[in-house]
Amino acid sequence: MNVALPLRDIVLFPGTFRPTHFGRVVEVNAISRILETSEPVVAIQQVEPGDQDPEGAEFHPVGVVCQVLRVIRMPDGAIRALLEGFERVQVTAPVMIDGMLMVKTTPMPEAPSDPVRYEALGRELDIRFREYMIGTGVSASDHDVMGADASDPERLADQVLGNLDLTYKERIVGLVGLDPLARLEYATDQIVVALSQQRIATEINQRVQSAMDKSQREFQLKEQLKAIRAELGDAASADEDGELFEKRIEESGMPDEVRDEALRELARLRRIHSDSAEYTVLRTWLETVCDIPWGVHTEDVTDLRAAQKVLDDDHHGLEKVKERVLEYLAVRQLNPSSKGPVLCFVGPPGVGKTSLGRSIATALGRHYGRVALGGVKDETEIRGHRRTYIGALPGRLIRALVRAGSSNPVIVLDELDKVGNDFRGDPASALLEVLDPAQNHTFQDHYVDLPVDLSQVLFIATANVHDTIPAALLDRLELIEIPGYTEEEKLEIARRFLLPKLAESHGIEAAKLKFDKTALTRVVRDYTREAGVRELDRMLAGVYRKVARQIVEEGVEKVRITEKAVPRFLGPPRYYGELAERVDSPGVVIGLAWTAAGGEILFVEATRMPGKRSMKLTGSIGDVMKESAEAAMSWLRTHAGEYGVDPESFDAEFHLHVPAGAIPKDGPSAGVTMVAALVSIVTGRRFRTSWAMTGEITLRGRVLPVGGVKEKALAARRAGVTDIVLPARNRNDLEDIAPELRKDLHFHFVETVAEVLDLVLEPGE
Ligand SMILES: Nc1ncnc2c1ncn2[C@@H]1O[C@H](COP(=O)(O)OP(=O)(O)O)[C@@H](O)[C@H]1O
Ligand SMILES: [Mg+2]
């Protein structure tokens, strides 16, 4: 059985194409099915074109195997498609199966009865048909393209019958009723009639034409042109487009140079047809250019106290940062043309760098835009593609400017340290142009291709670390470090900022859900381990979601979250008691690292196995860290005697591992930690739980200063460390450390490796 497509007012002939409209359910079902399965389909013809319901209708016993092309689904569920007919087949009366008509088919037994007459008729028909087609305005070569000629009279007859202006009934006769020879005769009769009609029509036209005077003709031509355009598509909308753009260009406040160019392109737009690809490209460009907020300028809030209030209302703490921001705003106010550096907030994730940028916009009363630079590798992402590309877009900067909607917004260049560069041009150099006051009043986007003034934009940058920011950019930046929050600060941020925001976004009134302070502390300590507050925010959101469900499902009125209840909402603690558990055997010690995520505690594990004298290092550690390990080993072997270690105990295979293995780690500051791990394994002396250390070592056993002391101290306290061993020359860094941190942590300053070992390892037996 084959799927059948019932046709009722058009007739599809083999070798011809027919655009067709399908609105009836059986038709829509049939087309959906064949689009899915691509099985062959047979067009069958209704006897009575007026029958609306194909189920009861009668059909002619001949159908045409066909193909469905260019399917367009209309909004009302109907389908427009192009049918291509292939060959006649005999069909059985259709039956309904699964909402579709199905028929059985058998090939037609066809062979002309009088071959000589058949071919002669074919030649005659070909000549007449050409004449007819030329009369309708189709050129002879187009006709050939249709592929019908005297060598295949049968195909030619179908072409003729398909193309002449015939009634449904007349066409049906040609499709179903006749054997090949009779069909050819029938087609010849029809073309003779058509030709004589054509001649008469031409004659009348000529009379009319000469009778008409010039103005009438012009009028008629215009009307015809309109009719043709309407037929081909939306001439009217094309010109509406033109008027719309004209208005937008005039009102946009573009600089003259830009306006002239835009008007020139608009004139071009009006000349080309609205269906062409070029039209779309040009229109999109004009739209973008008009969208750029050329003349839109917001007034700055000049009251610094009001600005300070906004900053305070949005962010807890960060005193130094806010102070610096306000100074910066003051200078810009006194000297608007001052080309000072661009502020760049540097710190671990979740400390509020991005949201500070937004706050600054609010504080100044400016619009806000953000350009995410993470993973941007290609200059064109910043500067856009030339518009000759189909689907080309302006770069991210222009898009941010358009979204901001004013020519002097605050734009945050987010995660500047994540900009990569590769062979497709260097995004950093495009950014440099953006940030350079000497160049940014004529910023060139490849797509817009007209200078855009960015000099009124207040740029703010953010980064996790500053050492991967390209040096040329670094030159233009003033770095402001945000090291991370203490536990007290996190609690305060949660209470004053995160919880109210969550209450609002979850539609739970603040009075309905109360957190005990001890419960919040528990979430901070046992469920998060981070410098910022992002994970904390996520955890608290988890609680809000569960409570929302209780309110809706169980009609709960009020919820109080106590310390004991936290695991009910968040599951077992995620970081509980890790320290003590992990350092309970010799060879495992704790160091402190400074990464893009802020400070972190670092476990270093050493083991010794029987084998050839060697040392293996694992855990994604970089070259500098490997060298530290070598230095640690050399120092230990030189001083083995002092620690009561038999030199022969080095005839073994050592393995140093730094979990978690997938996170790359590098830098020299793990030197002391490596020595301690090795000494611990060869002497069997255990590491003191709740201690941690950091420091670079020399071969002579001196301890050198390291970076990131603040971040490391925060991380240590987070993890439950009580005592930190630091290089003596880092003593000054303590001044910056929050008082509550200093209260909880004991700092021990050392100058030599020997001192470190005395402090962090338990005495041997
Ligand atoms: N000091 C703070 N006071 C109030 N909310 C803060 C503070 N620091 C961070 N947040 C909040 O934490 C979330 C994460 O901040 P975000 O700006 O995305 O961090 P970053 O850009 O540094 O990774 C935001 O909802 C932000 O408002
Ligand atoms: Mg951010």
Image: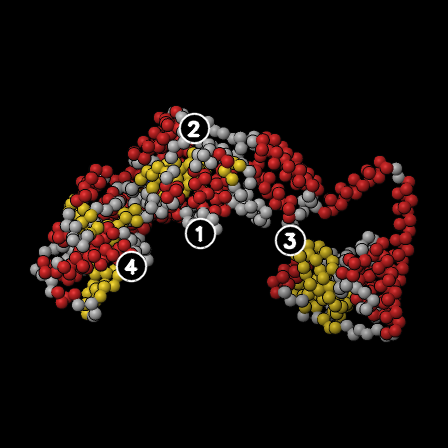
Q: Residue at x 64, y 63 (%)?
A: 34
Horizontal and vertical percent position of residue 526: 26, 49
Between the C-alphas of marks 1 and 2, the distance is 35 Å
| Mark 4 / mark 3, whichever is N-terminal | 3
Please give the label number shown on residue 337.
2
Q: Residue at x 79, y 64 (%)?
A: 148
Res. 630 in view: yes
Q: Is residue 246 left or right of residue 310?
A: right
Q: Which residue is mark 1?
A: 422
Between the C-alphas of marks 2 and 4, the distance is 51 Å
Neighbours of disc 1 within 10 Å: few (<14), some (14-19), many (20+): few
Q: Which residue is mark 4?
A: 619
Q: Amino acid at mark 2?
A: Ser
Whether residue 195 is situated above or below residue 500 in the rendered picture: below
- CB of residue at label 1: within 8 Å of ligand 2? no
Q: Amino acid at mark 1?
A: Asp
Q: Residue at x 52, y 30 (%)?
A: 296
Q: Amino acid at mark 3?
A: Arg
Between the C-alphas of marks 3 and 2, the distance is 58 Å
Whether residue 680 is situated above or below residue 442 in the rendered picture: below
Using the image as rendered, state which of residue 735 and residue 575 is in the foreground. Answer: 735
